[in-house]
Amino acid sequence: MANPGLYCAYIAPTYRKAKIGFRYMKAFLPDCEWVKDVEGKLEIKLANGSYIVFLHGRDAEVTVEGEAIDRFVIDEAGKITQQVWFSLLTTITQTRGKGIVTGTPRGHTWYYKLFKRAINDPFFVRVTIETASSPYVSDAAIEIARRLLPAWLFDQYYRAIFTSQSTVFGNLSGMWRTELEVEAKIMTYAPNGFKLIEPEGIRFWLDPDAKKRKGVMVHGVDLAKINDYTVFYSTNSNGELVGYCRFRKVDYKVVAARFVDFVRRFFPECENILRYDATGVGVSVGEEFSEIFDECDDIDISVEPIVFTNKSKNQMISRLTLAIEAGWHKAPRIEQIETEMTSYELTVTRNGAHTFAAAEGEHDDVVSAQMLSVSGAYNSDKADQASELLEKVMSGGDIEEDDILEAYADIVSGENNDDFFDTDDTDELDFDAETA
């Protein structure tokens, strides 16, 4: 109102959210002839030439790129793709525009990274506003929420804290190996192996304790598709992440050769099990792996191709969640691992089926490799424990009742028990009340 000719954008994740913003702005403005609003288009025009447009979803990204924006609001930033923010930046550099990026903390997405960056970057002003500071919410209402909600959800929604918590995998705080304060090293692949270089290269981490890189090793490999990343995630029989590698923009033959080099250099004395995503292009990649492995007499590698369906994903996610809750799976606090785990989401389709994937605009390559690796290692470890317990029972040894129950639970959650349940492997669930 005080500045003529401004182009302003209010960006929300959904149409309904954008409409809420429209109603707020409309309520702030006087009801007079120099204020015109078009509710069908979610636009407000002022007589001084200033203009407010309310955008949402994919439309926001496309529209923002085509305009020079003077003022903006990104509402519920944790639910908006990073590309919208990048597109917006290209326009406000022309206009020296100002704006607000706001929202409830939600995992470790780009919004979390931006919030962290704002601590010391003078380009930003950072503000945290807890619910308790609002004059419209009573202390009693907040206390009820504190009692009813899990602590991490209360911290997120009422205290505006970004938590190490996943909506899918639960509380991750116990998963991190705190004795390893580590950033993934920048490394690259060369014909004679991995070399440490700067600044370009792949993300790579290896457990410094060689003793942890012995015995059975389960390597989960997620293969890159166009703009995605290939990830190696290696878990030992004690549930510890001991090897990690993330890179992209190489063909599948190179991926296979790189994996062989990865195993030969860092896990030469292990019984290596490769579990990879065999969905789609994974079939042809599996042939590449087999050809190269046939020529490797010096290393022990067995291959388990896994086709990703909703059913197989559910099984792997369940095992990974159990492994984390039981304190069995441990990993160094590598930022990309935490980011992908906290932003991994469950979506329910119209007919009641549910799917798992990264939040829009984020990657889930690390999580896919992690699920392959940890679920295989966890299942193998629990199967070994169950076998030992069975031998003890057969030999007449004394065992605790709790051990029997735990072993039974582990066996039921095992990988090869689909025949006990529904074996239909379709991705969608047909539901009718009469059958139910």
Image (cartoon, rainbow, N blue to C red):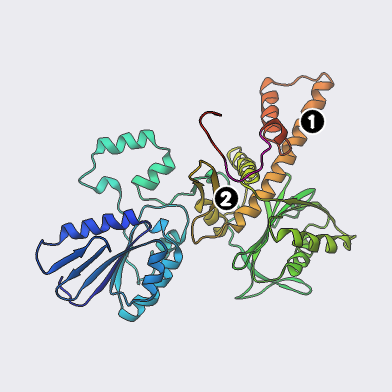
The quarter of the picture where residue 234 lies is bottom right
Point out the stretch of residues depicted in magenta. 422-429
Mark 2 is surrounded, within 10 Å at the Cα level, by few (under 14), some (14 to 19) or many (20 or more) other residues, namely: few
The quarter of the picture where residue 262 lies is bottom right
Q: Is residue 204 visible?
A: no
Q: In the image, residue 43 lies at what x, y percent?
A: 25, 65
From the image, tell me which residue sits under label 1: 388
Q: Earlier in the sequence, mark 1 or mark 2?
A: 2
Q: Is residue 80 magenta?
A: no
Quarter of the rendering occupied by the C terminus: top right
Q: In the image, residue 102 lies at what x, y percent?
A: 33, 59
Q: In the image, what residue occupies the spot 79% across and 26% down?
A: 390
Q: Is residue 162 left or right of residue 317?
A: left
The quarter of the picture where residue 53 lies is bottom left
For label 2, the SS is loop
Mark 1 is surrounded, within 10 Å at the Cα level, by few (under 14), some (14 to 19) or many (20 or more) other residues, namely: few
Q: In the image, what residue occupies the spot 16% across and 66% down?
A: 36
Q: Which of the pair 208/240 is nearer the observer?
A: 240
Q: Is residue 217 left or right of residue 81?
A: right
Q: Which mark is residue 178?
A: 2
For label 1, the SS is helix
